[in-house]
Amino acid sequence: MKTKQFRSLLLKDTTQLTYDKQEILKHYEEKEEKIVQLLDKFQDYEALMQTIFINSHFFVSHFDEIQTWLESKEFNKKFLSKLSLYPSLIDPKTADYNKLGADLAWDLNLPLNYTPKLVWMSIQSSGTMMNILATELLNKKRIYTFDNNACGAWNADGFWDNTNRLYKFCLQHKPEIITVGFRNFKFFHLLLSDTKVAYIVRDPISLFRLAVNHVDNEALKKGVTDFTLAMDWKKNDIFAKISYYGNKDKPDINRTVAFKDKGWFGFCFDFYKTVHVLENLNITPFCLEFTQISPENAFHTYKKLQKLCGFHIEDEKTLQNLLSHRINRFEGSLISLPVRLHAHEKHLEQLKNDSFFEYEGGVDIFVSTHALHPNKTEFIDLTKKIFQTRKLLFENIIILVKRSQIHILESNKELFTAVQTWLHSYMDSFEENEKNIKEKLYDENQILEYLHNEKELALKLKESLDCCYKHIKEKYPHYLKKWKYYQKFEKLCHDLESTK
């Protein structure tokens, strides 16, 4: 049956590769008997058969090389004996990655051609954005991918969708540190066995809090981000319009905690499956607890990882600034930032005219955060000079002006005073808006109260968490003792079970 499917696949008008179809059929007919024997021999190894079918033209045109490899002791040891889900179709040691190209190398299940210093196995709402930003800073490249489909998926025609940009990037640039979503199973399968992998776990009830309060990024309507000193911005709705999942104007606890959003539950808790995958590949990932990457501890943790893994930190000051001043914006906080204020002395005559005009020779002032602007080499920080003794609602908000433009403010006291007045007024409205956002959000105690009133749901959740956190309980029991809301949840479930 497999043989008939294989032959019909060869006859298909596929754009899989630019092979000459007649040439392929000629190769097949010349070696048909051996091909049939090999397919029959491995017909029960489904993952290998899928890989062969995906690469049918390559398989036929390189049959002798592939046959030697598949019948070798090394293939048997590495893949066949373990029934690996992603067996390499050719010997990685002899593969010419440059000649094959990244797409074909991916289809052939070839491992990465180097060993990264560190791979972050990213879990949603557990330091994900922090590690994305730190990874980009350290590598000076945007290389993160989280989409589960980035590891490839079978489409309707049975062919593999080559969507793993991260794999391609790694083959080309060989970054020292990678951050990749834990559901990219194939990517993890293609790591070399000496790769160091780390992941972060946290109190699961806090994960639920973030899930309940998470904004719907696709429904987010951006606010005004560019102002002039003479704009009458108070008459407009300037802040971002936030929607929560389910197109709600406030978080819906029923939708998330009740597992109606099953995809989200998988994004946060199914990481244990990838841990098992790595362990089967002789990679033992090390697990960090969330407080180790808190703003107070994150830089120290990265320095410890640097010693352990050997990656390079070129700009320690910028990294420390990034890690120590970050904030979670996925609950809506600071989502309206950054904004830019353009000021020119001509605006001083137009303050009541609602002028949108920008003038050459003016100055741009940015309201931002340390996380959004970790590298301030080209800027002067005016935060203290602008707000003086005022205590801001968020300590990580900063006011920046380009070094090349600071003289415009320094040489015009009236302009500086007008800018200072504008920023205080803007901050009054901004902080009021932030307080309104925060009032809508659920906290952990409210989630526990909700679960207390939903007995069946609470016990169902406990059953799921017992499975997901089994290896954490076994290897890192001291982590669980730190999680006060999880401890409350365990007691809640114990009380509920005793009343059955």
Image (cartoon, helix red, strand yellow):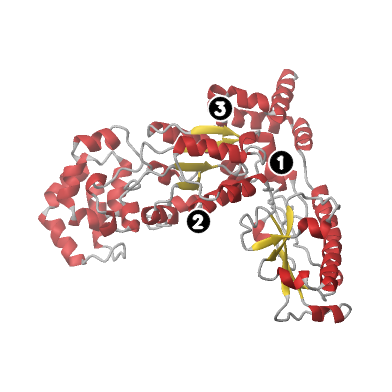
User: Is residue 285 in view?
Assistant: yes
Q: Which mark is residue 190?
A: none
- Label 1 belongs to which residue? 209
Kind of residue sitting beneath label 2 = Lys
Kind of residue sitting beneath label 1 = Arg
The local crowd at label 1, few if under 14, some if 14 to 19, many if 20 or more residues have their Cα within 10 Å, is: many
Who is closer to the viewer here, 324 or 58? Answer: 324
Q: Nearer the viewer, mark 2 or mark 1?
A: 2
Q: CA distance from mark 2 to mark 1?
A: 33 Å
Secondary structure beneath disc 1? helix
Who is closer to the viewer here, 283 or 398? Answer: 398
Q: Nearer the viewer, mark 2 or mark 3?
A: 2
- Left or right: residue 76 versus residue 111 is left
Q: What percent of the width, then of the height, locates residue 38?
A: 18, 44
Residue 378, located in which quarter of the rendered image?
bottom right
User: Is residue 221 in view?
Assistant: no
> In the current view of this chain or complex, which residue is farthest to the left?
30
Q: CA distance from mark 2 to mark 3?
A: 33 Å
- Label 2 belongs to which residue? 140
- Left or right: residue 45 versus residue 320 is left
- Left or right: residue 184 versus residue 408 is left
- Label 3 belongs to which residue? 472
The local crowd at label 3, few if under 14, some if 14 to 19, many if 20 or more residues have their Cα within 10 Å, is: some
Mark 1 or 3 closer to N-term?
1
Secondary structure beneath disc 3? helix
Residue displayed at 78% across by 72% down? 411
Q: What percent of the width, then of the height, locates residue 113?
A: 33, 48
Q: CA distance from mark 1 to mark 3?
A: 20 Å
Secondary structure beneath disc 2? loop
